[in-house]
Image (cartoon, rainbow, N blue to C red):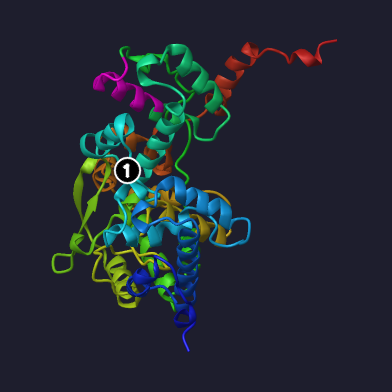
Amino acid sequence: MRISSRVQITGPLAAFGDGFAARLSKQGYTDLSLANQLRLMAHLSRWLQETRTAVTALSAVQVRRFVRQRRRTHTAFVSERALRPLLGHLCEVGALAAETHVESPRTGVLGRYERYLTEERVVLPDRRARYLAIADDLLLRRVPARLSAADVTAFVDAQARQPCLAERLTALRSLLRFLFLDGASPANLVYAVPSSPGWQQTGLPKALEGGQFRAVLATCDRRTAVGCRDYAALLLMGRLGLRAGEVAALSLDDIDWTGGVVIVHGKGGTAARLPLPADVGTALVAHLRRRVRREDTRAVFLRAHAPHRGVAGGTITALARRALQGAGIPSGSAHRLRHTAATEMLRHGASLTEIAQVLRHRHIGTTAIYAKVDHEALRRLAQPWPAQDPIDAARLRPLALPWPGGAA
């Protein structure tokens, strides 16, 4: 007997139980996970009945009240996030207003800023979420019209100990620039944000050697569906240099199997056509044959657990990091595989212009860092050390100063 069939729902949500169970089953939930969701639904239904609250009157404030009460008696599914599948279903069937959903849309200045990032700047979802988090922090207790340079300085001081400071400052500049353009702030406070210390072109691309990349690929158990998925994603990053967000955004409509071409949707809403190598195409076919079949999504890479929707860029970054660590490489993630693709192209004779086209760099200066790893070309440019010549050595020796520590 199925576990979910033994869950009894009473109260105002009982009429929605069958529809909710069918929705979860269609999304790929196992019977045990489905039963846990139905138990949470039964608890909320009893709470609504006890508090004499109609389903249509359920608000975000009452959802938080229910979560606080549930934490007193339960240890699992005790967050607002756990209620997202149920609230999403109730919104879809029209039992709740959209504003009741835990992930309610932003309004006011933040809503306009979100549309600005999405429609005008075409910022990818992962980065957009980080930008909006900075905006939430800054405007939590501040009114945009009253923002001052002192407020910006105080906010930067509070963020100084946080990781990825340079990206946080970039997000802050983006918000302040929008507030001025939108008219929400009378002054352009962008110039109140200090520059984070940093020097360009100082390091070397941390590419993997051939043996290391094979070891990374070997961490994927291709006997499983998840292993096939991870293997295909790693190949796209290590062979074609795709970013994590670009791998996550890949759609079935982006692959031209007849022409051997894949369309990559990159930064700023750009799209580029890249050749699809045979090994990458074979890996994608193996993944698509093993993955869960969903008619409501065209995403190539899906979540391993229900609901089986398209993965986020963070998921691709995490699987790349796990694969590197599994191969004995302690640092790096998706971008290190991108460096590997560029370095391998350079080693096989590709020019920096060709590498820039594959990596879809807007400026050739971004690609110039890979010139440092072309040791053969650099060796031809290096001049011999003058001291190798006895004449030069005799001429240079009087110029050398004695070490101060050796003086009496």
Most foreground residue, 345 or 323:
323
399 is higher (above) or lower (below) than 276: above
**Residue 12 appears at what percent x and percent y?**
39, 65
Q: How many labels does the image show?
A: 1
Q: Which residue is drawn at 30% across and 36% down?
A: 114
Q: In this view, does 168 lie above or below 148?
A: below
Q: Position of residue 102 (x, y in %)?
A: 40, 49
Which residues are drawn in magenta?
A: 172-185
Q: Is residue 75 left or right of residue 381?
A: right
Q: Give how far across and how far down residue 344 sits, in percent.
A: 37, 52
> Is residue 182 highlighted in magenta?
yes
Residue 337 seen anywhere in this rendered image of the structure: yes
**Magenta stretch prevailing secondary structure:** helix
Q: Quadrant of residue 363?
A: top left
Q: Which residue is drawn at 50% across and 70% down?
A: 39
Q: Position of residue 305 (x, y in %)?
A: 43, 68
| Residue nearer the viewer, 366 or 263 | 263
Residue 38: quarter of image: bottom left
Q: Tell me which corner region of the image, top left, top right, bottom left or bottom right, holds residue 205.
A: top left
Q: In this view, does 310 lie above or below 8?
A: above
